[in-house]
Amino acid sequence: MGFYHFARKEELLNRFDVPLPIEAFAFDKDANQLIVGSNQVYWIDPVSSNRVDSFSVSGNILAGAWINDIAILPDHTIWVAGDGGVERIDTKTKTSKVYSKIDGTLPCNGAVSLCEDVGGNLWAGGSCGLLYYNFNEAKFVTVLPDKSTTR
């Protein structure tokens, strides 16, 4: 299992081996590393194809499934979306914070997508609509609710 990377200059297809299917990935331009996710987050060196590091995310955000999406913010945090919530990983300290419906920091059960805009704001697509991360209150708020569901 794993995923493939096409090296354009060499016209080579490189295989990156990880033990489980990859459901999400992002590229950290500052560290020049691929960040991939299955049931944990892996840092991959794109030159050597070696796994540099890994981080086990909270089982609560996975809800028995895989990581749905990964976003990397300029403050060197990695945000991971899962069916049970969102987790922020501080890459310098290797500590994390979970955002969930249980503790009121996420208005719905989980998130399927993450995106940073040009202003550094974090957005999430959740089971309850479009969400915005309020950095001052340290929680996600609903901006555009999904009226087709009551989840």
Image (cartoon, rainbow, N blue to C red):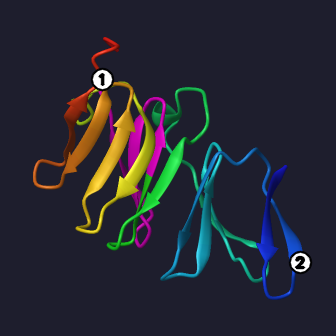
User: Residue at the location (63% across, 67% down)?
Assistant: 53
> In the drawing, what numbered circle is on residue 51?
none
In the figure, is residue 89 to the left or right of 34?
Answer: left
* Residue under label 2: 12
Q: Amino acid at mark 1?
A: Asp
| Label 1 element class | loop
Estimate the x, y position of residue 83 in percent, counting from the top left.
48, 30
Q: Is residue 109 above or below residue 75?
A: above
Estimate the x, y position of residue 9 in percent, counting from the top left.
80, 88
Q: Are marks 2 and 1 in contact (CB under 8 Å)?
A: no
Q: Amino acid at mark 2?
A: Leu
- The boundaries of the magenta stretch are 80-102
In the figure, is residue 68 to the left or right of 76?
Answer: right
| Label 2 element class | strand
Q: Is residue 147 above or below residue 123?
A: above
Q: Is residue 78 above or below residue 46?
A: above
Quarter where residue 106 is shown: top left
Which quarter shows the C terminus? Answer: top left
Measured Cα–Cα span from mark 2 to mark 1: 43 Å
> In the drawing, what numbered circle is on residue 146?
1
